[in-house]
Image (cartoon, helix red, strand yellow):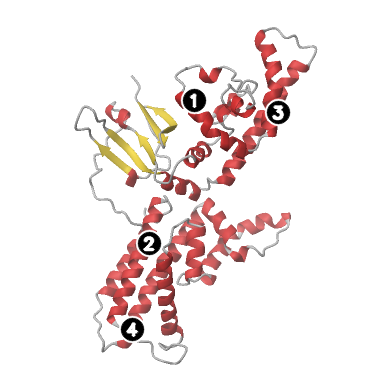
Amino acid sequence: MSSYSEIKINGYQLIDWGSTYYEWYFDKADRERIIAKSDDERDFIGYRTTVATIRRRLHLAGYDRKSLERDFNETRELWIRDLIENSKCYKDDTVKIKSEFDLFMKRVIPGKIQVLRNTTVDDWIEKFPIALERLHLSYDENFNEVEVDIPDDPLLSFMLSPLDGVHNHLHHGFAGALFPCMQMESYALLLLGMSDDDDLCELDITDIVHGGWVDDFEDIEQEQVGKTYFYDIFESSIKEIQTIKYDGSTPVLQRMIFSSIITAMEAYLSDTMKRNVLNRNAIKRRFVETYKSFSSNELTENDIFKYLDGLDKKIRHYLDREISFHDTKHIKTLYEGVLNCKLQQDTLALIRGYASTRHDIIHRNGRDRNGDAVDISSEDIERLLDVVVDFITDIDKQILDGLLDTGNE
């Protein structure tokens, strides 16, 4: 007897499998193992996280409104082409219509073509929750196998009807007539769009664990590393700094320590950005679309492949030579725009001030613009440590949550 697993987004099924499962955009940190303690409870073994987290992970993998619209348009064109091809059979006088189904197809195909041609992706997105709710509430197993005719609503009628006329079942896509798309991620975006940020996404493997098809989460209670490779380096640098003895009698040393903390932060931000931009195509594309130095390039078609061959080298140059990761403008633009991290604006404001002080220490020989010596107290160092460690720790958690490249083997 088969056992099943499934992914649900806010209670709506995305997909199910028999006797196996696929982690999709869930992470090991999302695992939960809840064993019922009474008859009115049920076990849960699987993965749980929020709609906001899954939405962000999809976005970072390149699945967003643009990808949804592209998938919609390509699938819709396939349907239109198939329907037109089939309609020719019924217009051809040499083809003898032999059955009631043939008469039915001759009547409905033109209407289906008209619906597809006259509606936009926004029209479908607007109707999707209504159609989904009707399917969700229906207890009729044949509900989606008969032609539905809702007065004055041809699109909703189409969505709830079988996809007759598109005879190539490979063209039916992931959702059938409910929404033209080939990719599961496009359908997931629709479900996520119906949900609040804190609604639940879950991959339930309880049944296949109990059925013996896959192993239980026996290590669920073991402590997980919970940090990236670059955070480990950052943390080691901070610990080394904290071992240095300093007091009011060592002003030069205290200025050096202050600068080193900013440098450790800068190294983490630079390495994390570089690794993800160079290793994830969706993030590389977002970097190119976001960073201003790419906006002035004009390409002829003959130069496209030559440009692509040198793109990684150009990206490395910008990241290593042009972008300062102690400049909060760059941090905000790239970490929010490219890696989709949420940064605390008050923390950025503090770091901006600290970075300015570091600039005076490094580039003005420890003096400010007025020529006065920069005084760094032990309290200044402790405050800077607290701010920078909290800032990088928060970003690192978001890197892990986003299933980005962590640098870990």
Could you tell me how far apart the alpha carbons at marks 4 and 2 are, in whole angstroms?
28 Å
Q: Is residue 79 left or right of residue 339?
A: right
- Which numbered disc flags the more N-terminal residue, 4 or 2? 2
Q: Nearer the viewer, mark 4 or mark 3?
A: 3
Image position, residue 51 (x, y; %): 42, 44
Q: Which of marks 4 and 1 is in front?
A: 1
Residue position marked by numbered label 3 in the rendering = 114
Image position, residue 171 (x, y; %): 60, 28
User: Is residue 120 visible from the viewing direction of this image?
Assistant: yes
Query: Residue at (72%, 54%) from the top-left corner?
Result: 301
The foreground one among 299 and 134 is: 134
Residue position marked by numbered label 1 in the rendering = 135
Callout 2: helix, strand or loop? helix
Query: Residue at (40%, 72%) from the top-left corner?
Result: 350
Q: Nearer the viewer, mark 3 or mark 2?
A: 3
Query: Residue at (66%, 54%) from the top-left corner?
Result: 305
Q: What kind of residue is marked 2?
A: Phe
Image position, residue 283 (x, y; %): 52, 54
Q: What kind of residue is marked 1?
A: Leu
* Residue 163 to residue 225: above or below: above
- Which numbered disc flags the more N-terminal residue, 4 or 3? 3
Could you tell me how far apart the alpha carbons at marks 3 and 2 are, in whole angstroms?
55 Å
Callout 3: helix, strand or loop? helix
Q: What kind of residue is marked 4?
A: Ile
- Which numbered disc flags the more N-terminal residue, 3 or 1? 3
Identify the disc placed on residue 145.
none
Residue position marked by numbered label 2 in the rendering = 230
Q: In this view, does 199 lie to the left or right of 187?
A: left
Residue position marked by numbered label 4 in the rendering = 376
Which quarter of the image is occupied by the N terminus?
top left
